[in-house]
Image (cartoon, grey):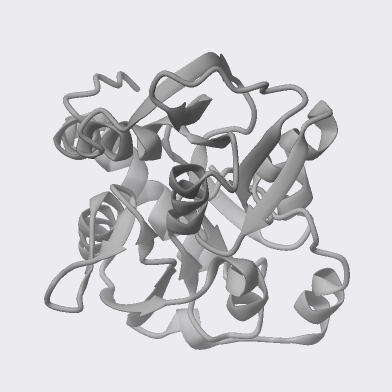
Amino acid sequence: MKFLVKIAGIAAVAVAFAVTGASAKTIRMGTEGAYPPFNFVNDNGQVDGFERELGDELCKRAGYTCTWVTNDWDSIIPNLVSGNYDTIIAGMSITPERDKVIDFTQEYFPPDPSSYVALAGSNPNLKGGVIAAQTNTIQANYVASSGAKLVEFATADETIAAVKSGEADAVLADTAYLKDIVKASNGELAFVGDKIYIGGGVGMGIRESDTELKDKMNAAISSMKKDGSLSALIAKWFNGRKVTW
């Protein structure tokens, strides 16, 4: 549930660039590959995680063959618009700002709160201290407007490293991402402060011209919600989380 802050100029590219790749049977699925459990690259060098499993099933139900492409978060929307892949399936929140540039399917993951994580036993000043966030996310935007000093990093992993090294007092990120990080830290990290409710549900980003692809993916998502398979997939990847559609 990330939010691109700087998207000026991308809309012009979207208007100027006509793409027909999504009309083919093979669909290129673009993801970051660095935001577990939503998406990550496993030890075999393959895209893995909740969105890999979800995306493959959606393609199957929609009658497509999927291939997977990884892309840095900063340029993930411009590269969709430019035709380097046909969808974004990367933990991306549906926001009005993004919707001016690309289309979205219906949500396949419900709105999730953001949380702060700091060194266990510390008492960080969340309103006036140094807070890390991944660049161009809803969390970075929130920290910048909160009165705290924002330090931005290109990847989520770097925000965690900044807290561990003392470069940042805390990190603000999606709770779903931070849960496994805190659990794996063996007591080094802990949640602090209140949860922050920003951003909407997560959907698949699609070029505005690819209406057929959007319609087919929406139908596939609806079918997974109806038969319970989407809820089961969320429970599998997010520690038994219960979601009712």
Asked whether 93 or 106 is in front, the reply is 93
Residue, x 48% and y 49% (percent of image)? 165
Q: How many marks?
A: 0
Quarter of the image that includes the C terminus:
top left
User: With 90 as the anchor, is 134 left or right in this view?
Assistant: right
Direction top: furthest residue: 194
Q: Position of residue 243 (x, y in %)?
A: 30, 21
Q: Is residue 68 visible?
A: yes
- Camera-nearest residue between 98 and 140: 140
Q: Quadrant of residue 13?
A: bottom right
Q: Please indicate whether residue 123 sits to the left or right of residue 91 in the image.
A: right
The structure residue drawn at horizontal position 77% and vertical position 39%, both measured from the top left corner, is: 149
Q: In this orientation, which residue lies closer to the viewer: 140 or 204?
A: 140
Name the residue nearer the viewer: 22 or 231: 231
Seen in the picture, residue 236 relative to 46 is either above or below; the reply is: above
Q: Is residue 166 above or below residue 172?
A: below
Q: Looking at the picture, does residue 108 appear above or below residue 70?
A: above
**Residue 95 shown left or right of residue 56 in the figure:** right
- In the rendered image, residue 49, in percent from the top left (x then y), is placed at 23, 55
State the image coordinates of residue 4 (x, y, percent, origin top left): 70, 55
Question: What residue sits 28% from the left and 73% below the top?
Answer: 64
Q: Is residue 30 left or right of residue 208?
A: left
Asked if residue 139 shows in the view, the reply is no
Rendered location of residue 11, percent (x, y) = 82, 69
